[in-house]
Image (cartoon, grey):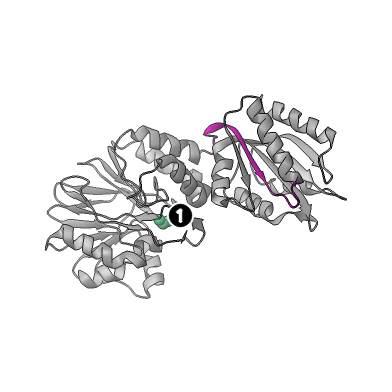
Amino acid sequence: MQISENVKYVGCDDHEIDLFEGQFDVPNGMAYNSYVIIDDKIAVMDTMDANFCSEWMQNLQDELAGHTPDYLVVHHMEPDHSSGIALFAEAYPDATIVASKAAFNMMKNFFGRDFANTLVVKEGDTLQLGSHTLQFVAAPNVHWPEVMMSYEASEKILFSADGFGKFGANDIEEDWACEARRYYFGIVGKFGTNVQKVLAKAAELDISTICPLHGPVLHDNLSYYIGLYNTWSSYEAETEGVCIAYTSVYGHTREAALMLNDELEALGCNHVEIFDLARDDMAEAMEGAFRHSKIVLATTTYNNSIFPFMHDFIDRLVEHKFQNRSVALIENGTWGPAAAKVMTTMLEPCDNLEFAGKITIKSALTEQNISEIKELAKTLVK
Ligand code: FEO
C-alpha cells in the first residue's frame, strides 16, 4: 500500500486476537503498522507482532521488489512491533539496526543476543537516506522508556510510534476518536506529562502526515487529532458531562445509578455515560471517566471495603493519574455503610478532585434517597 511514491505501508491486520496486551478487548481486531522508505538507501520502519511476521516479510519483499534494505529503524521494543527483528536480521544480514540505546538493551533481553550491525541514535540525530532524511525525536514513556519517533522533512511525515494509535484493524472503518481514546487512556494515559513534551516538540515540526504503529495513517485535519491528544495528555475533560460507574449486588445501587442517569437526562444533560463495572468493558469505563468533566462512583460496602470491581476501577483511575474532575459518591451498606470513606481514601492520590456530594443508602432506596438523587442531579448539571 502506498503512503506516497517512496513511502509504503507493509503492516498487517490481526483479526485473530482476542485480548490486546493480554487485557484489552478488541472486537474489531488490531493493526500492526510497519513502513518502508525507498530512496538511495532503504529504511524499514519497525517490524511486527510474532503471529504476523511471515505476512509482514511477504509484504516487505513485495514492496522491495528485489532490493535489499539498508536500515531497520526500531522506534519501540514492545513485542507487537519488535518480534520480527531477528527474522529481519537473518534475512538481511548487511542491514543496520537503528534504535535508541535503551531499545538495544531491551533487544538483548528479548532475543538473548546482540546484533551485528547497529547504530545508536538519540534526540536530534539524523539518518540520511538520499532525498529523505530521518530526524529522531526522543519520546520516552510514550509508551515505553526506549521509544523514539522520527520525522522525515521532505515529505513532512511524523512516524509517531504508539502515539496517535488506536484499537481496531485498518480494514474496518470506524470512528477514530472512540477507539483511539480507549487505547490512549488504557495504555498511554499514565504518561500525560511525557506526551505533552513530545507534543511541544511536534509543534516545532511542519507535519502533514502521521504514520503511527497502530490504526490509520492520518493525513487530513491533523489539528483535530493533535488537539485531542493535547486535551487527553493534559488530563482536562474533553466533554462537559457525567460518567456514572457503579457496581450492584442485589440491584438497589443499580437502581440509584439508573435513577440518577434519568434525572440528569431529564435536566438536559446530553452527555451521560453509565457503566456496570461488573459487566461492561473496564477500558470503556476508564475512557468514560477520563472523557467527562464529572464522575459518580456508586458501590456497596463489601468485606469491610468496597465491591471488587469498583476497587479495581478506582485503582486503575489512580494509577492512570485521574485528576481535575468533580466526583460524587453513592454508597450502600445494610448495617455499616463505609464505601464512601473507602473510596475517598483510595482517591486521595488524585490531584484536584472536587467532591460534589455523597448519598448513603442503607439497603433499598428510601424517599429521602430519591430526593437526594434528584438534588445530586441538579448539582451535577449546574
Ligand atoms: Fe503498540 Fe506499546 O506497543
At horizontal 80% and vertical 56% (from top left) the residue drawn is 304
* Location of residue 293 (image quadrant): top right
For residue 202, say whether it is visible: yes
- The x, y position of residue 265, in whole percent, is 63, 29
> What residue is rendered at 21% in x and 56% in y?
43
* Residue type for callout 1: Val
Which residue carries the number 1 mark?
26
Residue 77 seen from this side: no
The answer to whether 31 is drawn above or below residue 89 in the figure is: above
Q: Is residue 244 one of those drawn in magenta?
A: yes
> Can you give x and y, in whole percent of width and height, for residue 47 in the image?
30, 61
Q: Position of residue 41 (x, y in %)?
A: 15, 56
Which one is nearer the viewer's eye here, 198 or 155? 155
The residue at 53%/49% (across/down) is 190
From the viewer's perspective, is 9 left or right of 305? left
Residue extending furthest toward the right: 335
Would you say 354 lies left or right of 369 here?
left
Secondary structure state at the residue bearing disc 1 = loop
Near-viewer residue (85 or 263): 263
Is residue 340 rendered magenta in the image?
no
Residue 29's quadrant in the figure? Answer: bottom left
Image label count: 1
Q: Which residues are magenta?
A: 235-251
Q: Answer with left or right where residue 302 lies relative to residue 13.
A: right
Q: Quadrant of ligand 1?
A: bottom left
Residue at x 43%, y 52% (from the top left corner): 140
Label 1, ligand 1: CB separation under 8 Å: no
Above or below for 297 versus 17? above
